[in-house]
């Protein structure tokens, strides 16, 4: 079909975006990671911890926790959920995303291990 764009016909993709914040004596630190060259979208770009909602996920919050653990190795009590924001839609010109934002607090002594 001429002129078809993904966002016109495909359903939006639900993703979680997890902002990890640590308060230190010097101020607030925010974790940003560089996306691997092998990922399907936004390869090589800087981002918060994020991932697609997958079939079988019990909840959006469970997916956020799975991404945090899988990408940083963090588990409670080293990390805690501070808040879940309202989902919003982003259209990047090739795809439409429904972003489910989360903020997590990271303890001062927590060791973050990225893959």
Image (cartoon, rainbow, N blue to C red):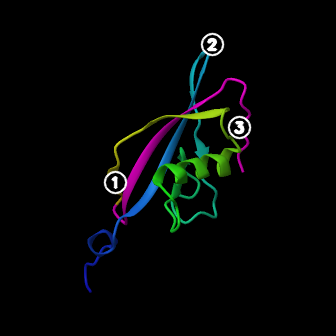
Where in the figure is residue 102, as x and y percent of width and height? 47, 41
Is tag 3's residue or tag 2's residue first in the polypeptide sequence?
Answer: 2
Cα–Cα gap, marks 3 and 2: 18 Å
Is tag 1's residue or tag 2's residue first in the polypeptide sequence?
Answer: 2
Cα–Cα gap, marks 1 and 2: 35 Å
**Residue with the mark numbered 3:** 112
Residue 77 falls in image quadrant: top right
Residue 100 among magenta residues: yes
Secondary element at image label 2: loop
Where in the figure is residue 15, as x and y percent of width and height? 45, 56
**Residue with the mark numbered 2:** 25
Magenta range is: 93-115
Relative vertical location of residue 3 with respect to residue 57 in this rendering, above or below: below
* Mark 2 surroundings within 10 Å by alpha-carbon count, few (fewer than 14), some (14 through 19), many (20 or more): few
Q: Which residue appears at 67% of the width and 52% of the height?
A: 70
- Tell me: 48 left or right of 70: left
Secondary element at image label 1: strand
**Residue with the mark numbered 1:** 90
Secondary element at image label 3: loop
């Amino acid at each position: 079909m001429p002129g078809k764009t993904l966002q016109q016909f495909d359903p939006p993709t639900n993703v979680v975006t997890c902002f990890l914040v640590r308060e230190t004596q010097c101020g607030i630190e925010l974790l940003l990671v560089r996306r691997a060259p092998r990922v399907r979208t936004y390869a090589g770009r800087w981002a918060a911890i994020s991932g697609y909602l997958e079939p079988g996920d019990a909840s959006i919050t469970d997916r956020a926790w799975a991404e945090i653990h899988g990408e940083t190795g963090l588990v409670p009590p080293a990390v805690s959920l501070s808040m879940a924001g309202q989902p919003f839609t982003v259209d990047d010109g090739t795809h439409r995303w429904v972003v489910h934002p989360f903020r997590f607090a990271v303890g001062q002594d927590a060791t973050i291990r990225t893959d």
